[in-house]
């Protein structure tokens, strides 16, 4: 569960804003707008949230501040999508394959290692594949996580074809009856076109060897970068069909409102959140817990 108050700059004075006014007027909505924007929620998403709230006040004849608070909570939760959206997808049979993508420095490799640890503790046999062959340090780091998580590990020499690593990983996973293959990838923005082509090739290998696309293409984003995360997410979503987001570094320094912006503007759900440095600090994303943490911040 997320720690209460983890989003310390979000709605710190929500009780004062709502119950202290004693009336529902446009000035109250202006105050909400300021709080939403300060929370790193985009202008477009903020306007959509406030429009839904205004409609509810009018259509449902809300007359008390408590009514508005309850409705605001529901509007924010609804903005994060359907409840089932946040669940991870796994194959019905054979090894599932989860691809982790994202630019360098966002916590991609660490998040994948934490996911291996989480799945291992759930009783799944996991294989980690070092698909970032352009940074030996990334493969070394993933190898350390494999030991920590008790996972199988596949890597090749530096600058090898990442798709070849995935091919080997699928073969090993089948031979050793692994439940889940977790694939790390490179994230070199300065050769963006090559990177995207590599990711597409990995997708083709997966389809050929498993008979389907990756079960998840997770995009790792640094929650502390705010709106910069949105531009990264748009590029990867178009190029490789991202199915879910992993927000790394979602600790007390992150404003967190970018989560609503990403969901509204991309239509891609957040599936996992990193809330600390420990191996167990990667959690399933729960919209209700997240919004409650925002409101209690």
Image (spheres, rainbow, N blue to C red):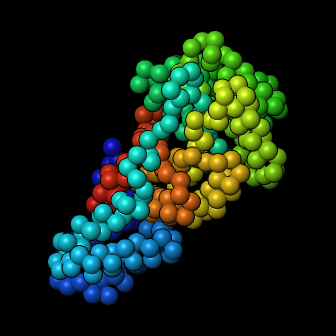
Query: In this picture, is 292 found above or below 87?
Result: below
| Picture quadrant of residue 21 | bottom left
Query: In this picture, is 20 found above or below 209?
Result: below
Residue at 32 percent of width and 53 percent of height: 288
Quadrant into which the N terminus falls: top left
Residue at 17 percent of width and 83 percent of height: 22
Residue at 50 percent of width and 75 percent of height: 43
- The foreground one among 241 and 256 is 241
Q: Residue furthest bottom?
A: 26
How far across and down, in percent of the image, does residue 290 sit? 36, 54
Quadrant into which the C terminus falls: bottom left
The answer, for residue 228, to whether it is visible in the render is yes
Residue at 48 percent of width and 50 percent of height: 270
| Count of number-bearing discs | 0
For residue 140, side relative to residue 264 (left or right): right
Query: In this picture, is 278 found above or below 22?
Result: above
How far across and down, in percent of the image, does residue 265 sit? 55, 64
- The foreground one among 193 and 189 is 193
| Picture quadrant of residue 145 | top right
Query: In this picture, is 280 found above or below 175?
Result: below
How far across and down, in percent of the image, does residue 232 sit? 65, 57
The answer, for residue 147, to whether it is visible in the render is no
For residue 176, side relative to residue 68 (left or right): right
Q: Residue furthest top?
A: 175
């Amino acid at each position: 569960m997320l720690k209460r108050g983890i989003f310390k700059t979000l709605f710190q004075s929500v009780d004062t804003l709502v119950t202290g006014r004693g009336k529902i007027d446009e000035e109250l909505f202006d105050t909400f707008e300021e709080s939403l924007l300060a929370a790193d929620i985009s202008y477009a998403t903020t306007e959509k949230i406030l429009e839904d709230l205004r409609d509810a006040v009018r259509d449902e004849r809300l007359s008390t501040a408590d009514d508005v608070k309850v409705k605001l909570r529901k509007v924010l939760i609804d903005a994060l999508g359907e409840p089932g959206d946040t669940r991870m997808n796994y194959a019905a049979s054979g090894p599932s394959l989860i691809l982790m993508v994202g630019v360098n420095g966002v916590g991609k490799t660490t998040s994948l290692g934490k996911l291996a640890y989480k799945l291992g503790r759930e009783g799944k046999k996991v294989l980690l594949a070092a698909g970032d062959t352009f940074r030996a340090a990334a493969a070394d780091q993933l190898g350390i996580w494999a030991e920590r998580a008790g996972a199988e590990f596949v890597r090749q020499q530096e600058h090898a074809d990442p798709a070849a690593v995935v091919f080997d990983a699928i073969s090993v996973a089948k031979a050793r009856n692994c439940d889940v293959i977790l694939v790390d990838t490179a994230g070199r923005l300065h050769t963006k076109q090559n990177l995207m082509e590599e990711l597409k090739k990995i997708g083709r290998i997966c389809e050929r060897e498993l008979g389907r696309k990756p079960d998840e293409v997770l995009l790792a984003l640094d929650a502390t970068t705010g709106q910069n995360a949105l531009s990264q997410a748009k590029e990867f979503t178009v190029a490789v069909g991202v199915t879910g987001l992993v927000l790394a570094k979602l600790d007390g320094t992150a404003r967190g409102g970018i989560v609503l912006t990403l969901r509204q503007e991309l239509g891609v759900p957040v599936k996992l959140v990193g809330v600390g440095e420990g191996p167990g600090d990667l959690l399933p994303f729960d919209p209700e817990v997240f919004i409650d943490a925002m409101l209690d911040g």
